[in-house]
Amino acid sequence: MERRKVYVTVQAEHAPDGSCRPTRIGLADGKCYEIDRIVQVSRCASMVGGRGVRYRVRIGRTETNLFDEQNGRWFVEAKLQ
């Protein structure tokens, strides 16, 4: 399945130690999704271009990759329909 980069808004908790924990993702169409669980955090490149800190997150029964480019921008690897 083909994917594309989609920039999103992210609500996150920031700890005194500098760590970041995303809690909600907002799409351009107004839909918001609560992040139920963070499965994994690692630095890597995206399949759709770009790199940064990858958060493998679970929203309901679906897992997806959320990337923090560390320049104030976040994106997901969205499936093309």
Image (tube, rainbow, N blue to C red):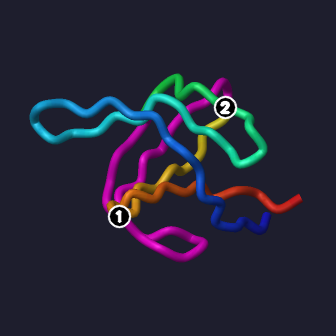
Q: Going by the image, does 5 lie left or right of 67?
A: right
Secondary structure, magenta segment, majority class: strand
Is residue 76 shown in magenta?
no
State whether residue 41 is above or below residue 39: below
Is 28 positioned to the left or the right of 39 in the image? right
- The span shown in magenta is 39-61
Dot 1 or dot 2: first in sequence order is 2
Residue at the image point whose x is 11% and y is 31% from the top: 16
What residue is pinned by disc 1?
71
Quarter of the picture containing the N terminus is bottom right
| Within-10-Å neighbours for mark 2: few <14, some 14–19, many 20+ | some
Determine whether 24 is above or below 40 in the image: above
- What is the spatial separation of the Cα atoms under label 1 and label 2, in whole angstroms? 22 Å
Q: Quadrant of residue 48?
A: bottom right
- Quadrant into which the C terminus falls: bottom right
Q: Nearer the viewer, residue 17 or 71?
A: 71
Q: Position of residue 14 (x, y in %)?
A: 25, 33
Is 24 situated above or below 43? above
The numbered dot on residue 32 is 2
| Three-letter amino acid code at the position of disc 2 | Cys
| Element under disc 2 | strand
Residue 13 location, quadrant: top left
User: Which of the 4 image quadrants contains residue 49?
Assistant: bottom right
Identified by mark 1, the residue type is Asn
Q: Residue at x 62, y 39 (%)?
A: 26
Instruction: Judge from the rendering whether residue 25 lies leftward or rightward of residue 60; answer left or right.
Output: left
Residue 35 coordinates in the image, percent (x, y)? 53, 28
